[in-house]
């Protein structure tokens, strides 16, 4: 068994007790963590292929992203001053022109950005499937496999066009039957239920204002029949709340309840506009939340009640969200933004701590994905997804508390990132892709998309 030893670094395990070591070690054996503890690694280990001196560094679990839309990498920086609904209406016509090479290039860009910044489990929610555009989900899966990152691919869908009262234009939606059939096929083709899976499929109709009630209900039935998880957008804006009241006579959470969309196997992006009853319903059913603070700020959606969600016991992870509403495309900066934005809300006296912010981005995300027994903390037996952050440089050397340095300081450079025991980042550089080539290919595909969209 090959072993990798990392020692002489601060260690934040993010286990149930938040155990930390000012100077500690982790031993990786194969694709799993074998031991974690204070001081140097035990002597006499066999098969050590690598010994990393982590002096000046903090070792944490790898970051877990719980909400994203890779294809938006090609439409960053547009509709800069719009709220959600205006922003969607402005971008749908362009998004409806995407094809497989574009989605592949966008996925590589999105993934490269995240992996370089310490993400070890990526997630994508793809819901735009223009007729004849190729195998878009397959392109994302290929990109994730090449980047070497653990991946949750959510097969999204939209079937409520504007002529039926939905928000997206009719040309951007599928039929209910096509969406369900393609989602089932994606599960049968790609889903890996094994405990150390690098790829899981999720059923993910887009939102209450772009999906029929039939598709919501039948998606929930499909996911439960297949034993996979469910994901969608929920309670993002006041406009969505108004839409739900007008169309369904109820708010989003009651609508989700009615359609079979509350449960331990469900998580929702955003959950900004939640009253106390909504939060209690999520807590009672174990429904999870992907908190996306930068996107919520960019689209003026509001501030999710994260301290209240956590106090109620709701599983909460962090999400980048699509890069048309969070152009940075990074998850490590969301640790800080989650903390800062929540301190601007109504709950200052219950504000998040730096350790809670780190937990959201690691163990919280793992829990939201239903993988808390496999990833999300540094504990013996868990999968070896971990990140060694450099904290002795200009950006952090005067912050004594390493977790505070990571969360409150500038984005920390990644000295080493392991996914499934394999190095994917070394000294701040991706090992699994040529960053310059990824950037160039994505720019070319973004220009091609803009050109095609302008011809319409
Ligand atoms: Zn989203």
Image (tube, rainbow, N blue to C red):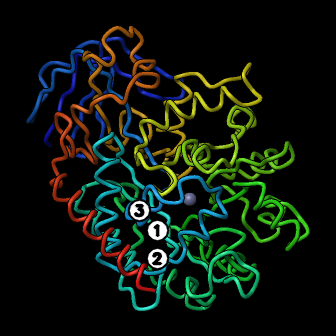
Q: Nearer the viewer, residue 140 or 90?
A: 90
Mark 2 vs ligand 1: CB below 8 Å = no
Q: Secondary structure at mark 2?
A: helix
- Decide if residue 24 is on the left or right side of residue 245: left
Q: Is residue 347 above or below residue 265?
A: above
Q: Which is more toward the observer, 185 or 414?
A: 414
Residue 180 appearing in the image: no
Residue drawn 49% across the image and 38% down it: 334
**Residue bearing mark 2:** 187
User: At x 44% / y 35%, what residue is drawn?
Assistant: 333
| Place of residue 55 in the rendered image (x, y in percent of width and height, measured from the top left) | 21, 15
Q: Nearer the viewer, mark 1 or mark 3?
A: 3
Lower sequence index among marks 3 and 2: 3
Marks 1 and 3, the one that precedes in the sequence: 3
- The quadrant of the rendered image in which ligand 1 is seen is bottom right
Look at the picture and state if 421 lies above or below 85.
above
How far apart marks 2 and 1 lie (CA) works out to: 6 Å
Q: Are marks 2 and 1 in contact (CB under 8 Å)?
A: yes
| Disc 2 residue crowd, few under 14, some 14–19, many 20+, Cα 10 Å | many
The nearer-to-camera label among 3 and 2 is 3
The crowd level at tag 3 (other Cα within 10 Å; few <14, some 14-19, many 20+) is many
Q: Which mark is residue 70?
A: 3
SS for dot 3: helix
Residue 450 in percent (x, y) is at 38, 73
Give the left or right position of residue 377, taking residue 325 as reference.
left
Residue indicated by mark 1: 201
First-in-chain label (2 vs 1): 2
- Residue most toward the front? 455
Residue 420 percent across, percent down from the top left: 28, 48
């Amino acid at each position: 068994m090959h072993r990798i030893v990392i020692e002489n670094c601060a260690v934040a395990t993010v286990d149930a007790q938040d155990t930390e070591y000012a100077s500690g070690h982790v031993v990786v054996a194969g694709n799993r963590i074998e031991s974690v503890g204070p001081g140097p690694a035990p002597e006499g280990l066999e098969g050590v292929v690598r010994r990393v001196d982590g002096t000046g560094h903090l070792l944490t679990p790898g970051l877990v992203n719980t909400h994203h839309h890779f294809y938006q990498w090609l439409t960053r920086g547009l509709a800069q001053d719009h709220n959600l609904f205006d922003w969607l209406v402005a971008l749908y016509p362009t998004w409806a022109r995407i094809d497989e090479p574009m989605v592949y290039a966008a996925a590589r860009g999105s993934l490269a950005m995240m992996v370089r910044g310490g993400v070890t489990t990526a997630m994508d929610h793809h819901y735009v499937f223009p007729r004849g555009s190729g195998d878009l989900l397959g392109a994302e899966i290929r990109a994730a496999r090449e980047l070497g990152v653990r991946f949750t691919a959510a097969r999204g869908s939209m079937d409520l066009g504007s002529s039926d009262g939905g928000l997206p234009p009719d040309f951007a939606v599928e039929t209910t039957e096509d969406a369900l059939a393609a989602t089932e096929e994606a599960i049968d083709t790609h889903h890996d239920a094994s405990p150390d899976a690098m790829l899981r499929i999720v059923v993910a109709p887009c939102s209450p204002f772009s999906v029929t009630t039939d598709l919501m209900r039948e998606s929930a039935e499909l996911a439960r029949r297949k034993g996979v998880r469910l994901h969608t957008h929920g309670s993002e804006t006041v406009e969505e709340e108004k839409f739900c009241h007008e169309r369904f006579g109820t708010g989003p959470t009651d609508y989700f309840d009615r359609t079979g969309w509350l449960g331990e196997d469900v998580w929702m992006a955003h959950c900004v506009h939640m009253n106390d009853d909504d939060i209690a319903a999520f807590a009672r059913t174990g429904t999870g939340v992907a908190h996306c603070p930068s996107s919520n700020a960019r689209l003026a959606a509001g501030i999710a009640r994260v301290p209240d969600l956590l106090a109620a016991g709701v599983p909460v992870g962090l999400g980048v969200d699509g890069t048309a509403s969070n152009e940075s495309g990074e998850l490590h900066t969301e640790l800080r933004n989650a903390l800062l934005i929540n301190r601007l809300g109504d709950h200052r006296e219950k504000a998040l701590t730096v350790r809670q912010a780190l937990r959201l981005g690691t163990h919280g995300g793992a829990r939201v994905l239903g993988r808390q027994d496999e990833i999300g903390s540094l504990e013996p037996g868990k999968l070896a997804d971990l990140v060694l952050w450099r904290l002795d440089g200009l950006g952090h050397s005067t912050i004594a508390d390493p977790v505070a340095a990571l969360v409150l300081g500038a984005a920390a450079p990644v000295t080493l990132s392991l996914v499934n025991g394999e190095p994917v980042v070394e000294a701040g550089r991706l090992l699994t892709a040529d960053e310059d080539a990824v950037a160039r290919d994505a720019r070319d595909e973004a220009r091609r998309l803009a050109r095609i969209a302008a011809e319409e």
